[in-house]
Image (cartoon, rainbow, N blue to C red):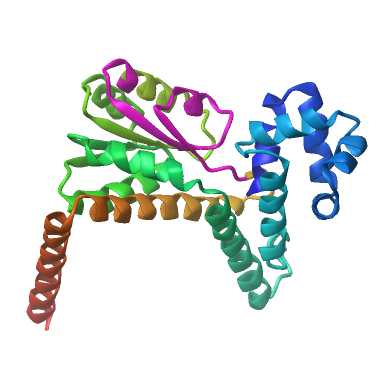
Amino acid sequence: MLLDSIRTQLDSLSKSERKVALAVLAAPSLIVSQNITALAKSAQVSEPTVVRFCRTLGYDGWHEFKLKLAQGLALALPGANEQPAPDDLAADLVNKICSRSINTLLDLRNNLKPELIQKALDILSRANKIEFYGQGSSGFVAADAQHKFFRSGVPTVAYADPAIHSIAAALLREGDAVVAISQRGNNPALTRSAKLARRGGADVIVLAPSGTPLADIATLFIPIDLVFAIDPYTPISARLAYLVVIDVLAVGLALQRGPEFRKKMQNAQKALQEYDMQFDSFIG
């Protein structure tokens, strides 16, 4: 995900920082074995520019950036960057798709900042209600989020229709929260709804790539930087990353709201199991 994050932010970097980015993308394995002086020389920039580049990506400096890069490369599985081909056997498809998904989750684990998750949980735990907005495939993620969160005792709803979430956002007030989900971060309707929610005083948590219009509007931005231009199958693993972040937030909220709310969730699960048993008995 670190290399993906660099690719997605290339256009927003300064001219000198972009030189560093291209040097890293050209030979990431070599960069891990180099020091900051060697990278600055190969990119034809100063060492302070390398440090600024690392901080622009959200790291404290060169050493933290280099560590994250090394971790990502070490954990990467073979076949993850290979495109599915028409002549692939079933075994090839299993390897490529599963490896890509596993690598996506490993990158997510290594780059998702715990402090941002905690801030999101603080916002969600004090919210009067939580609304999830997403369109296209992100709309399915929003629906999944609503399904997971409503069991925590907080009123929740998910909207994938741009006209509907626009109206809903305009009605939000201080104390409400929106989670806006976008795999590209540049959807005009979703961006407009996020602005409307902010205007009414609601907090807006954004799950999207860095350097996007939607990210700029967020009360709290959780970057999920993935590359979408590799092939048509990339969104499969990308959607998985978003679903995992939703799972983390849902479980975290349930734990943060205390034992009474966890008991309510258990009662809800018990009721569902009893319904399933009755339905099975009716069918039988």
Q: Nearer the viewer, residue 181 or 255?
A: 255
Q: Is residue 211 magenta?
A: yes
Q: Is residue 183 above or below residue 265?
A: above
In the image, is 254 to the left or to the right of 97?
A: left
In the image, is 98 to the left or to the right of 277?
A: right
Name the residue rendered at 41%, 24% in the picture. Answer: 189
Count how many numbered circles sit on residues in the image. 0
Residue 187 visible within the image? no
Image coordinates for residue 223, horizontal then vertical, percent? 52, 39
Residue extending furthest bottom? 284
Name the residue rendered at 57%, 61% in the picture. Answer: 101
User: Quarter-wise, where is residue 175 in the image?
Assistant: top left
Q: Nearer the viewer, residue 271 or 24?
A: 24
In the image, is 158 to the left or to the right of 118?
A: left
Image coordinates for residue 281, horizontal then vertical, percent? 9, 81
Q: Is residue 150 magenta?
A: no
Q: Nearer the viewer, residue 224 or 98?
A: 224
Name the residue rendered at 61%, 72% in the picture. Answer: 94
Image coordinates for residue 228, horizontal then vertical, percent? 62, 44
Q: Which residues are magenta?
A: 197-226
Q: Is residue 149 above or below residue 79?
A: above
Residue 84 visible within the image? yes
Q: Give the quarter of the figure containing the C terminus.
A: bottom left
Residue extending furthest top? 199
Name the residue rendered at 44%, 43% in the picture. Answer: 115
Image coordinates for residue 10, horizontal then vertical, percent? 71, 31
